[in-house]
Amino acid sequence: MREATTWRPDTGAAVRSRRIGVSGARAGAAEAGAGGTGQGPTAQAGPEAVSASASAGRARSDARASAVEVGTRPQADSTDAGSRRATPDAETGAGGTGRGLSPQAGPEVGSGCAGLGQVVAGVDGVGGVAGVFCGVRVPEGLAARVPAEERGGGRDDVRLLVSRGTEVSHHAFRELAGLLRAGDVLVVNTSATLPAAVDGRVEAAAGSGGGERLVVHFSTRGDDRRWAVELRSPLETGATLPRRGGPAGTVMRLAGGGGLVLEEPVGPGGERLWWARVFGGDVAALLQRYGRPIRYGYTERDQPLAAYQTVFALPSADGGGSAEMPSAGRPFTAAMVAELVSRGVQFAPLTLHTGVASAEAHEPPYPERFEVPAATAWLVNAARAAGGRIVAVGTTAVRALESAAGPDGVVREAAGWTGLVVTPERGVRVVDGLLTGLHEPQASHLLMLEAVAGRAALRRGYAEALRHRYLWHEFGDVHLLLPEQTGKRCSL
């Protein structure tokens, strides 16, 4: 039996049901069909393996989704624990709020904060750990303004910072195969990037002339067919600035003759993302015809949609996808995938459709659709049982995989919505390592990185990245966080 949770944005409730499903293998089982699957591992390494697509409206979740649940805060010491394992009582799942988390912006860099690990107001009114390096600023010159292939090389022509505990080494990304070992599993996100930015105009009152020009970022489709959207003010450069959403009832006209009506904020007290009812056409068709990739001010110019797709991206049958690229997978090429497979590294596909990030406010993520197929669950469990390392490619892969992992550390087939926020208090249950980009010092993603690698490793790695002038953001360099070479696996 598989417990499923659907997100009801109209009521804010997480509605539970039970569906017959296929469970993943138990961690200790290495033979085909273990754990009730009735079949051997079907997730193959390489591009052919990347065959998972999101299945809308199904989820495996628990009301106590993470350690940041209302009224709950585990007291585990998270200072420099290295690769952390989740506390047994911090169950995973879809968040339970049904509307998304109540995000809090961290203090500005250099504002007198106590550094990474400062206790501030967290999500849903519970104290948390702010992802802040106090006093650290990323120079504008370290923003990757164009893709690597426009800087004179190929997609894989980026640098790779490797952290093993507080030990740091510097590599080319093309050396990745030599840094992994046979039996390791790379968990990759197959979500395709949508052209999610569409021009629009606020409908003006009769006789008042033209309305305000805006750009609409389509973030996430709800179960009730509404869309979570972000309104942005356009700049002449093609980039946009943040703009407060609302008020309720605002009508916007979009390219092609359709439009949308803003109904309510996505989260309680939220101002950035609003639920909108779209009229006059299908959103998938609208995006394909009039949309373009979401772009932020640090980039130099618009890029074609192909620049925002990874080698792992697969189209979704329902037209779903990510508002923003799962960028950790961008440097991979078909040739590199083939080399990794030839060395015994396996690929485990899953899907998480990312919403619109909070590029300026650095809010925690809202609930997102995900799917972890049975074959991926089996492969991850079997690899762990055999001593292989589970390395997530991107924070989206961590969120999805950890959402499918039980307190016993076993990954099971799961799909639907996840509101899980991985923090140092919650820890990780399955992930041993993480390949990710370089994040802004205020970014909430740094909480996840600290949960995987420990605070000391994170601080040392980022100091080295600044010292050696690594490039930030989706077209930039990447960071591989691996366990210290102790030869022992942390236990639950």
Image (tube, rainbow, N blue to C red):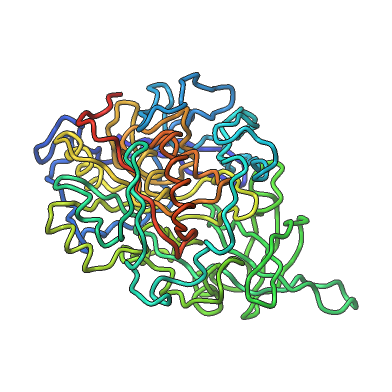
Q: Is residue 405 above or below residue 43?
A: above
Across the whole image, how many numbered discs are drawn on residues? 0
Tell which residue pokes out farthest to the front in this image: 467
Q: Is residue 212 left or right of residue 159?
A: right
The foreground one among 333 and 349 is: 333
The foreground one among 256 and 490 is: 490
Q: Is residue 245 above or below residue 204?
A: above
**Residue at the spot 82% in from the left edge and 78% down from the top edge:** 210
Q: Is residue 132 above or below residue 305?
A: above
Q: Quadrant of the N terminus?
A: top left
Tell which residue pokes out farthest to the left in this image: 31
**Residue at the spot 61% in from the left edge and 67% down from the top edge:** 297
Q: Is residue 250 left or right of residue 208?
A: left
Q: Is residue 457 above or below residue 285?
A: above
The foreground one among 393 and 41 is: 393
**Residue at the spot 58% in from the left edge and 58% down from the top edge:** 139
Residue 159 rendering spot, x and y as whole percentages: 36, 60
Residue 49 makes an appearance in the image = yes
Q: Quadrant of the C terminus?
A: top left
Residue 10 rendering spot, x and y as whole percentages: 62, 46
Residue 332 rendering spot, x and y as whole percentages: 30, 63
Tell which residue pokes out farthest to the top in this image: 75
Residue 452 rendering spot, x and y as whole percentages: 38, 37
